[in-house]
Image (cartoon, rainbow, N blue to C red):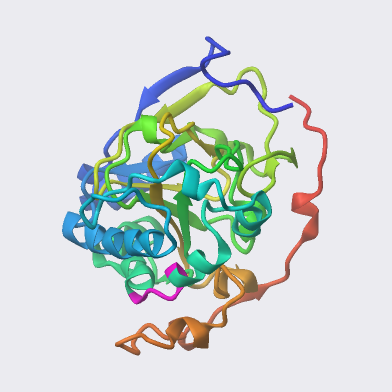
Amino acid sequence: MVAPSAQANPAIRKTLFVDSTPLLDDPAALRARGEEDGYLFFKGRLPADEILALRRELIAVVDKHGWRQPGQDDLGGLIDYAAINAVSDEEMHRTDIGVTADAYHDVQRLERFHRLPHHPRLLEIYRALFDREVLVHPRHICRMVTPHKFMVPTPPHQDFPYIQGTTNAWTCWFPIGDCPRALGGLTVLKGSHRKGYLPVQPAKGAGGFAIPLCPTETQWVEGDFAVGDVLTFPAHTVHKALRCQFKDRIRLSLDVRYQPVDEPVDNSSLNPHCPLTWEEIYANWQSDDLKYYWRKLPLQVSAWDNGYLKPARRIC
């Protein structure tokens, strides 16, 4: 059974993210902190104007599908509760990210959405961590968490069972706009990566599985995200979403993965995060430099293992 929330379990200890920006000039210290804590946080790492440019395009998709309250500027994320809840649960389940498949396909076609993960200020982090060439997974995920009745917070989980390949793949999570804790940002279980792979059980929320937590696993780290803040963690770090306290707004964020180019990668990480083909995604792009960029790299493609997502009992 998944552990109760912090509100129901007073033993849970919540601390704030520690900014690791000063360690970027000392890669050994950066790696040591990542190995100890299982996460790294960087304050204001990405330029706000570039984040907001993407937000503007994402909000335009929401507006196109009729889910936004009228009278806002082109960055406003206030949602029409009745309009979004007119969408069926079945349609929401198809994507599991907060909007319908048609809307998500519109997002996946955005060139800016695929270009931002290659930002030099992100690549600098992973070159320091890996001390070698970096592979940016082309499979980017946009979470567009709306107040639809079907949506529940993402439960505690590790990313490795979903991406596989190397355990040295790191997830980079950042909101597209300010994201205070009340909007449902991400929180990580400090040091949980050191336990390796943990068994899963079926659960509601993105991914469909959760890790049953042990009574001693209580040290959650969280914080309010300002536009440009970045959180990153390795594939075995347990993390989850905080519950959104609002019923009238959307939470926009990106999940991007990075790994050393010379370690195994599963083929699923090289495919789009939707049924569209790459050719359909690229159709209206203005530049060609990022099209199929991974095909130029000497990748080791590994086999998928279904066993990681088979329910199993966890012994605490």
Give the x, y percent position of residue 115.
Answer: 33, 72
Kindly give the residue lying farthest to the top in the view shown. Answer: 10
Which of 154/125 is in front?
Answer: 154
Residue 158 horizontal side relative to residue 293, left or right: right
Residue span colored magenta: 107-111
Q: Quadrant of residue 117?
A: bottom left
Q: How many marks?
A: 0
Q: Quadrant where the N terminus lies?
A: top right
Is residue 276 a member of the stretch shown in magenta? no
Which residue is painted at 52% across and 83% down in the image?
278
Which residue is painted at 42% across and 58% down in the image?
66
Which of 266/64 is in front?
Answer: 64
Residue 88 horizontal side relative to residue 99, left or right: right
Which residue is painted at 56% across and 34% down in the image?
192
User: Would you say the magenta stretch is mainly helix, strand or loop?
Assistant: helix
Residue 140 horizontal side relative to residue 182, left or right: right
Which of 95/294 is in front?
Answer: 95
Give the x, y percent position of residue 210.
Answer: 67, 38
Q: Is residue 12 above or below residue 44?
A: above
Q: Is residue 163 above or below residue 21?
A: below
Is residue 108 a member of the stretch shown in magenta? yes
Q: Quadrant where the C terminus lies?
A: top right
Which of 102/263 is in front?
Answer: 102
Give the x, y percent position of residue 280.
Answer: 51, 85
Which residue is painted at 32% across and 40% down in the image?
179
Q: Quadrant of residue 178?
A: top left
Give the x, y percent position of residue 121.
Answer: 24, 61
